[in-house]
Image (tube, coloured by chain):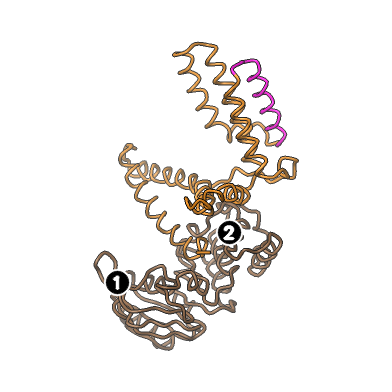
Chain colours: A brown, B orange
Amino acid sequence: MDIRFEQAEARFEGRTVVHPLTLSLSERRIGVIGLNGSGKTTFARMINGLVLPATGQVTVNGFDTVKDGDKVRGQAGFIFQNPQNQIILPILKEDIALGLKSKKLSKAETQAAVEAVLARFGIAHLADRRVHELSGGELQLAALASVLVTRPDILIMDEPTNQLDLRNRDLVERTIHGLDENVVVISHDLGLITDFDRVLCFHEGRLADDGAPAEVIARYRELAA
Amino acid sequence: MKTLYVEGDTFLHRLSPRAKLLGLAALSLVLFLIHSPAVLSVAALLGGIVYSSLRLGWRQSWLRLRPILLTIAIVAIFTLILNGREDALIVVTRLTALALFAATVTATTSTGDFIDEITRLAMPLERLGLVRAADIGLAIGLVIRFVPEILSRYQAIRDAHRARGLKVRPLTVAVPLIILTLKNADEIAAAIDARGIRAQK
């Protein structure tokens, strides 16, 4: 994984949401924390190219988010805060297959890929289920499957355990810890990221802290107090 | 967030979506060319037989067909008042036949198959440079997926009014509904981009 921010700044309606940021990310598991409105979601969206830098440059594995948006999105999958909005078709297996359309696979190849990713997350039994029937945890796993079926190198997750009950939160946390992909996780659930390789803390649109989880989390607690 | 598709392995399930869609288009044309109440009644009866072959049961069938049948009833009442009994009978039988055959096609074709077929049918328009065929298929898929979602959001806003003892007024429901729907639409558009579903070829 090679994510680079070169003086990249994000603005929204004339307001600076992320101040010019220069940063390089190569660790396999990166946590992003910060108070509400600190700019962490915008930062994550800049990686995937959903938010383009007003000035500066963001590259993902060598691809520029402005010039090579589709290639960047092929490298970096994104899981939204509300997985409900991410699942586009009513039947789970059809929705997962939709993500493979641009790969121009045969019907048999698509079916095999869908079955494999559902089996990987232990949700093969949900293949024919209607999305509205899924629980919060199942929806989050379904969203993971819908993104990882395209085999991105990096997975960005925006508050993946938000609004989940204890059982579903444990299920999703175990799944995240078991992922082989590089992950960038935005979370208010500090327990989720304690054993990550690196943690970034945003405050008022700036990178306020960056380092090992224990120290960054301790300083974040002081900041939030 | 409901789907009208019914899992099954009947002849109609196995029939290609193209055959079903083109067949339905041809049938609707024929139904609008026929003006005999007797023939249209037979068509409605046939539609009923084909629909009942899905074995959904009376209750499930009624729940699915209720909105369209009520709409047909309203149209028929207006036709009866304005044009008389024979025209009303023609309208009822014609639209009922059409609704039953269309509901059968919907119940036996998955959303994914619908999207694939509509995308293929729109390919000539793409070759003329008018549209992106995949966008048309995707738009139809989104409508099927999210219209019931908007309805459930409407119910939530209505409940929120009641919970606070407020009278449910069209304006106070419509404004938050539109704002929430547009906000949701932004998220869905971002998800489509993030998943690379509209990736350039």
Q: Residues within 10 Å of mark 2 (few under 14, many from 20)?
A: many
Q: Give me the residue at 58% from left, 69% from top.
A: A150
Q: Which residue corresponds to mark 1?
A: A17
Q: Earlier in the sequence, mark 1 or mark 2?
A: 1
Residue contact at pointers 1 and 2, CB within 8 angstroms: no
Numbered disc 2: what chain?
A: A
Q: CA distance from mark 1 to mark 2?
A: 33 Å
Residue A195 spot, x, y in % from top left: 50, 84
Above or below, A200 against B137 in this view is below
Above or below, A86 against B34 in this view is below
Q: Is residue B47 magenta?
A: yes
Q: SS of the residue at dot 1?
A: strand
Instruction: Tell me: A28 left or right of B178.
Output: right
Q: Main secondary structure of the magenta part?
A: helix
Q: Give me the residue at 60% from left, 50% from top.
A: B120
* Nearer the observer, B95 or B146: B95
**Which numbered disc covers residue B193?**
none
**Which numbered disc covers residue A98?**
2
Q: Give me the residue at 29% from left, 66% from top.
A: A12
Q: Which residues are magenta?
A: B35-54
| Occupied quadrant, residue B34 | top right
Instruction: Tell me: B175 left or right of A113.
Output: left
* Nearer the observer, A68 or B108: A68
In this view, which residue lies farthest toward the left?
Answer: A14
| Occupied quadrant, residue A3 | bottom left
Tell which tag, 1 or 2, sits nearer the viewer: 2
Q: SS of the residue at dot 2?
A: helix
Amino acid type, label 2: Leu
Q: Are marks 1 and 2 on the same chain?
A: yes
Residue A131 spot, x, y in % from top left: 57, 54
